[in-house]
Amino acid sequence: MLTALDHVQLAAPPGSEDLLRAYYVHALGMTETPKPAALAGRGGCWFRAGSVRLHLGVEPGFRPARKAHPGLRVTGIDAYAARIAATGAPVTWDDALPGHRRFYSADPVGNRLEFLEPHPEAATGIGT
C-alpha cells in the first residue's frame, strides 16, 4: 500500500551540479542533503525543504522534459515568485487551475517546476 511520496527525481546534464545548487538553495531556499556514499559517485545532488525532497540525477544526453514537472505547494506565493524572479529565473503565472494561484519556472538546465498555493477560501472550504 502506498503511504507517501518519498521524493521526485529530475534529470540534469553532467557537470551542472553547481548551477543546480545555486538555483535550488539560493532561489528556492532548499537545503542540499548529502547523497549516500554508494550513490555519490554518480553525480547529481539532492535537496530538501520540509517534507519536500527533490533529487537531481545526471543523465548523459539530457534533454529537459517539456511537460513533466513536480507541482510544489508554497505559502506566500507572491513573495516566493518575486524571490525566484530576482535570481533571473523565469516566472510565468497561470490562472487555469480553479481554487489556486500558480506559476511555472524552470531551473538552470530547463526542468519545469510548478508552484501553487490554494486560495484561502479553497483551503478552508469557504465559498465552495
Image: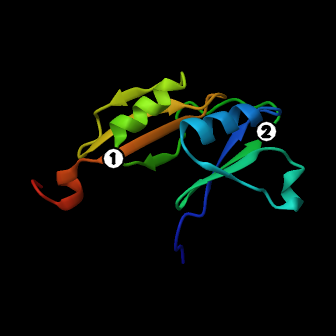
Can you give x and y, in whole percent of width and height, for residue 63 in the image? 70, 29
Q: Visible in this render: residue 114?
A: yes
Q: Quadrant of residue 38?
A: bottom right
Label 2 is placed on what type of residue? Glu
Q: Quadrant of the N terminus?
A: bottom right
State the residue in front, 31 or 125: 31
Can you give x and y, in whole percent of width and height, for residue 97 in the image? 29, 41
- Disc 1 crowd rating (10 Å Cα; few below 14, some 14-19, many 20+) is some
Q: Quadrant of the C terminus?
A: bottom left
Task: State the CA–CA distance, disc 1 to disc 2.
Answer: 31 Å
Can you give x and y, in whole percent of width and height, for residue 86 in the image? 49, 25
Q: Residue at x 44, y 26 (%)?
A: 91
Q: Which mark is residue 117?
A: 1
State the residue in front, 48 or 83: 83
State the residue in front, 23 or 3: 23
Q: Residue at x 85, y 53 (%)?
A: 40
Q: Residue at x 52, y 74 (%)?
A: 3
Extreme left residue here?
127
Applied colour scheme: rainbow
Above or below, comparing residue 66 to residue 38 in the picture: above
- Closer to the N terminus: mark 1 or mark 2? 2
Q: Which residue is mark 2?
A: 59
Above or below, comparing residue 82 to residue 2 in the picture: above
